[in-house]
């Protein structure tokens, strides 16, 4: 039986990679899903059509996570379409991987805007509309706790901010029974982090399991955190990284 029947989810960055698999999984568990995309309009519309059934509606909304107004109005639009909000997944993110001398202030500002401010705005707007007992799931990164190699400073900074925001917002929303958690993936095969490259081969040597994870590894954990079974888990970061951080 689907565990998320009658629930409504909003997922940022659902057109590709981890977000796409999260949208697929939540819909397969019976949730209606609204998801955002920025550039991949065609893929997003195909996905929404493919996943929509007579029982479960999936809609795609264009919204730049780096634009506070855009993300807030996307959440309001989703709420108007479905009439409720139970699950918010902040997945959209960018990774500028450069060493200190090569990072521009534009890189810095855009990283903060997309990876941090967008997450904050989505949580603030989403929480206002969210049902009691709702779920907020932020996609961080193991980089929040451990860099491991050069070139990760501003990406790691942004994901550490997500983990800290999660802890704080969990305290603010606890009285309403809303849980707030961060999932911190390690290397997952996507466009952002392809598993066949010199960089990937280097990363694999640092992992207990020695291979990349799949987008489904992450979506399974999202579905669990979105379900009633996870109701006592809040304010924490969960690593899912093939032992990268062990
Ligand atoms: P991809 O680059 O493969 O996909 C990114 C997704 O986010 C796309 O759907 C893209 O949409 C969307 N997106 C990017 N920027 C924006 C924006 N400004 N506004 C709205 N949507 C946006 O990344 P992954 O799937 O690999 O990563 C997803 C999340 O997981 C990120 O937060 C990332 O930091 C995190 N993560 C990934 C790891 C990995 O190894 N892959 C490891 C640890 C964390 P569009 O194409 O429409 O622009």
Image (tube, rainbow, N blue to C red):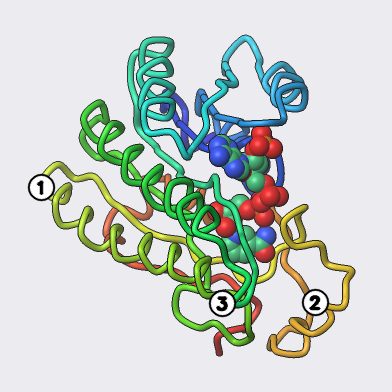
Q: Position of residue 229 (x, y in %)?
A: 38, 52
First-in-chain label (3 vs 1):
3
Q: Classify mark 1: helix, strand or loop.
A: helix
Q: Tell me the CA gap for discs 1 and 2.
A: 44 Å
Q: Which residue is mark 1?
A: 175
Residue 171 occupies quadrant? bottom left
The correct choice, above or below, for 233 with respect to 64 in the image is: below
Q: Which residue is mark 2?
A: 199
The label shown at residue 100 is: 3
Q: Tell me the CA gap for discs 3 and 1.
A: 42 Å
Q: Classify mark 3: helix, strand or loop.
A: helix
Q: Point out the image quarter for the N terminus.
A: top right
Q: Position of residue 193 (x, y in %)?
A: 74, 62
Q: Residue at x 84, y 81 (%)?
A: 201
Residue 1 at least partly seen: no
- Apparent side of residue 80 relative to residue 186 in the rendered image (left or right): left
Q: Residue at x 42, y 45 (%)?
A: 227
Q: Residue at x 57, y 14 (%)?
A: 55
The correct choice, above or below, for 133 with respect to 197 in the image is: above
Q: Residue at x 47, y 39 (%)?
A: 66
The correct choice, above or below, for 197 with respect to 82 in the image is: below
């Amino acid at each position: 039986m689907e565990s998320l029947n009658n629930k409504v989810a909003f997922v940022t960055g659902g057109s590709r990679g981890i977000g796409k698999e999260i949208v697929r999984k939540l819909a397969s568990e019976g949730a209606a899903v609204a998801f955002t995309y920025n550039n991949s309009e065609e893929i997003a519309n195909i996905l929404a059509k493919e996943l929509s059934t007579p029982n479960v509606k999936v809609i795609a909304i264009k919204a730049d996570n780096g634009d506070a107004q855009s993300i807030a109005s996307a959440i309001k639009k989703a709420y108007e379409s479905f009439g409720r909000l139970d699950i918010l997944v902040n997945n959209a993110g960018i990774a500028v991987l450069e060493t200190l001398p090569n990072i521009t202030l534009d890189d810095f500002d855009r990283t903060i805007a997309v990876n941090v401010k967008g997450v904050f705005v989505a949580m603030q707007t989403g929480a206002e509309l969210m049902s009691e007992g709702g779920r907020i799931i932020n996609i961080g990164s193991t980089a929040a706790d451990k860099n491991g190699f050069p070139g990760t400073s501003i990406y790691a900074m942004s994901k550490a901010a997500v983990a800290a925001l999660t802890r704080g917002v969990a305290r603010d929303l606890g009285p309403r029974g809303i849980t707030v958690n961060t999932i911190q993936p390690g290397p997952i095969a996507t466009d952002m982090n392809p598993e066949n490259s010199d960089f990937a081969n280097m990363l694999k040597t640092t992992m207990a399991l020695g291979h990349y994870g799949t987008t489904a590894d992450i979506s399974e954990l999202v579905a669990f955190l979105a379900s009633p079974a996870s109701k006592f888990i809040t304010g924490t970061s969960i690593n899912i990284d093939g032992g990268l951080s062990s």
